[in-house]
Image: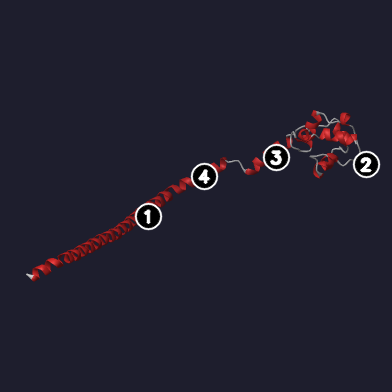
């Protein structure tokens, strides 16, 4: 009887060992199955890639065959179209002649209203806000040297001046060159 009681007392230990062994078996089985599935999937993908590459190579060979058959026709069409194409030199000549014959009337300042000044009467026009050394040089090139001339500019003169010196449209009015010039004359 003692052996039966001993066996019954050890039964929970045996059941625990059995459960551990069963769980180890199940984990090992499913891990092996998952790894094998991954290997077979990789192998299948490799085989698919080889099959697709073989099909692609066959298509390439077919395209090369087709191209060698069509190439003489392509060359013939290209030669015909080259005869019809205008040479770049001809286009350039036409463009140059059109550009040269195109003329635009440059606006002219009304020196009767703004007056005439000479370089020896020159004022420092850079004191006017918006006129830097470069713009002063351009103004001097068109014989504008003094504050008095700038103070007498009319709206049409300002438009003409803007175009002549390639200045920003509306900038002369915004900077109020006329008003600033008048204030310099007053001093």
- Please tell me whether mark 3 or mark 4 is closer to you in this view: 3
Of the numbered discs 4 and 2, the one sitting upstream in the chain is: 4
Q: Which mark is residue 96?
A: 3
Residue at the spot of label 4: 78
Q: Which mark is residue 57?
A: 1
Residues marked 3 and 4 touching at CB (< 8 Å): no
Helix, strand or loop at mark 1: helix
Q: CA distance from mark 3 to mark 2?
A: 42 Å
The residue sitting at 80% across, 28% down in the picture is 156
Of the numbered discs 1 and 3, the one sitting upstream in the chain is: 1
Residue at the spot of label 2: 120
The residue sitting at 32% across, 55% down in the picture is 48
Helix, strand or loop at mark 3: helix
Q: CA distance from mark 4 to mark 2?
A: 69 Å
Q: CA distance from mark 1 to mark 3?
A: 53 Å
Of the numbered discs 3 and 4, the one sitting upstream in the chain is: 4
In terms of depth relative to the viewer, which is nearer, 130 or 79?
A: 130
């Amino acid at each position: 009887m003692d052996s039966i009681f001993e066996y019954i007392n050890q039964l929970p230990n045996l059941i625990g060992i059995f459960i551990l062994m069963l769980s180890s078996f199940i984990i090992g089985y499913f891990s092996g199955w998952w790894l094998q599935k991954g290997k077979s999937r990789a192998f299948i993908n490799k085989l698919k890639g080889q099959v697709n590459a073989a099909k692609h190579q066959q298509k390439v060979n077919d395209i090369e065959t087709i191209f060698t058959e069509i190439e003489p026709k392509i060359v013939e069409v290209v030669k015909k179209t080259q005869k019809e194409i205008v040479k770049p030199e001809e286009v350039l000549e036409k463009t140059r002649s059109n550009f040269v014959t195109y003329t635009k009337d440059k606006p002219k300042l009304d020196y009767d209203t703004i007056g005439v000044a000479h370089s020896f009467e020159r004022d420092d026009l850079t004191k006017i806000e918006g006129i830097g050394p470069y713009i002063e040089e351009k103004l001097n090139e068109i014989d504008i040297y003094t504050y008095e001339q700038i103070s007498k500019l009319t709206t049409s003169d300002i438009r003409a001046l803007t175009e002549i010196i390639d200045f920003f449209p509306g900038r002369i009015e915004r900077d109020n060159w006329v008003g600033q010039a008048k204030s310099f004359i007053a001093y």
